[in-house]
Amino acid sequence: MKAIPEPTLRRLPKYLHLLMEWRNNNINYVSSQAIADELGLDAIQVRKDLSVTGIVGKPKVGFDLRELIRALCSTLNWNNVSEAFIIGTGSLGSALLGYKKFNDYGLNIIAAFDNDSEKLGTKVNGIEIFPIEKLEIMITQLKINVAVLTVPGDVAQALAEKLVSYGIKAIWNFAPIHLKVPDSVIVENAQLSHSLAILTHRLSKANLT
Amino acid sequence: MKAIPEPTLRRLPKYLHLLMEWRNNNINYVSSQAIADELGLDAIQVRKDLSVTGIVGKPKVGFDLRELIRALCSTLNWNNVSEAFIIGTGSLGSALLGYKKFNDYGLNIIAAFDNDSEKLGTKVNGIEIFPIEKLEIMITQLKINVAVLTVPGDVAQALAEKLVSYGIKAIWNFAPIHLKVPDSVIVENAQLSHSLAILTHRLSKANLT
């Protein structure tokens, strides 16, 4: 598979969300211009982005909406659901446990882990919370590749190392630190502070603080 | 102020977190090489990124750590705290209310809004939940510029339009839709599905699903 540039990858879910909305409105064909107009992007950019799916629009008609949705899901790998564990059930971890949409996005969270003894055995959104000590055996036995890390920064590195030693291949990191793991391990950072940096900087440029 | 490229802006909080860790370990001078090594980046990239702060490292000594921290905070505008409202107190909104670090990042959430009558008047992490109907008067009277939008996708656009009409100048959007607002309004999207897209795509390339 050809490597897709990261900015393109980040836009693909936008297209997918929009197309799904339109599908619900019984639209059958879409043009890159219409998508660009709706999302405030450039039509050439949209056409280039969508070309990574391998789908080609028909002249004057545009893209077959359903075909494009299928191709986007496939490019994003959202047809294949990976089972995942979530480590840390503080406020952010609990919120993610309550978020039912991850399944649509290719991630099925099947168990949660925490070291707070009061939480053990309880369920959030039907997902049981296990003690951290169970991580090794459950990762091994259930052949889990993906971990969502929502623990405080000061314990995140030690936990990441444990996860990798237990066989975890990909970490979705919400902890506010840079994780050092072997190159073979996939780390995607979802740190809110990075997004907030953009917002506060723009605010200061607009003299709104 | 010179416009800073977005990828650079997204890296600045990483540098800041690392430098703050190092400050706690009583380190006084740092080189861009040491920062690059720790974060798995290129030293030339780090030097270029840090140049936006206006701080210049001394040959053979490197950057004054505390001076660099102050300059990064100032570039990110994290010295000036903006007061903000959060709209929607579902699982994600509640998690954000419980997140005490936003204050360090220049955002002070002072009230929350929801249309669930059972939540009204209750507090999350000391922050009171008000009815949506109070938004207009409270935005006007308290001169609030920033709203954090954590409502479901199907009501997000209508709410964003209301917020803008009440005077909101910047929206930190967690709703899974593209918001259409006037160009003068700052929108920063913090949609988890975009980050997840990168993760699931990398997983598929590594044949791990």
Image: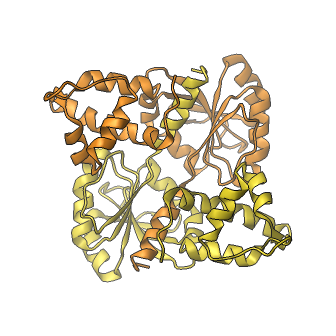
Chain colours: A yellow, B orange
Question: Is residue B153 placed above or below A127 in the rendered structure?
Answer: above
Quarter-of-image position of residue A29: bottom right
Q: Residue A203 appears in which quarter of the rendering?
A: top right
Residue A116 point in image, percent of width and height: 32, 54
Is A105 drawn above or below residue B28 in the view shown? Answer: below
Frontmost residue, A136 versus A20: A20
Left or right, B19 with respect to B181, comes to left
Report whether B25 appears left or right of B175.
Answer: left
List x then y, in percent, for residue A87. Answer: 36, 60
User: What residue is shown at x 48% (from left), y 27% (from top)?
Assistant: B106
In the foreground, B156 or B96: B156
Q: Nearer the viewer, residue A34 or B87?
A: A34
Q: Residue drawn 42% across and 72% down?
A: B203
Residue A124 visible: no
Q: Residue at x 57, y 24 (%)?
A: A205
Residue A172 location in percent, x, y? 41, 60
> Between residues A2 and B148, which one lies in front from this camera angle?
A2
**Position of the C terminus of chain B by quadrant:** bottom left
How many marks the image carries: the answer is 0
* Residue A151 higher or lower than B2, as above or below: below
Q: Is residue B186 left or right of residue B17?
A: right
Q: Residue at x 19, y 32 (%)?
A: B30
**Quadrant position of residue B50:** top left
Image coordinates for residue A18, horizontal then vertical, percent: 73, 61
Q: Is residue A53 visible?
A: yes
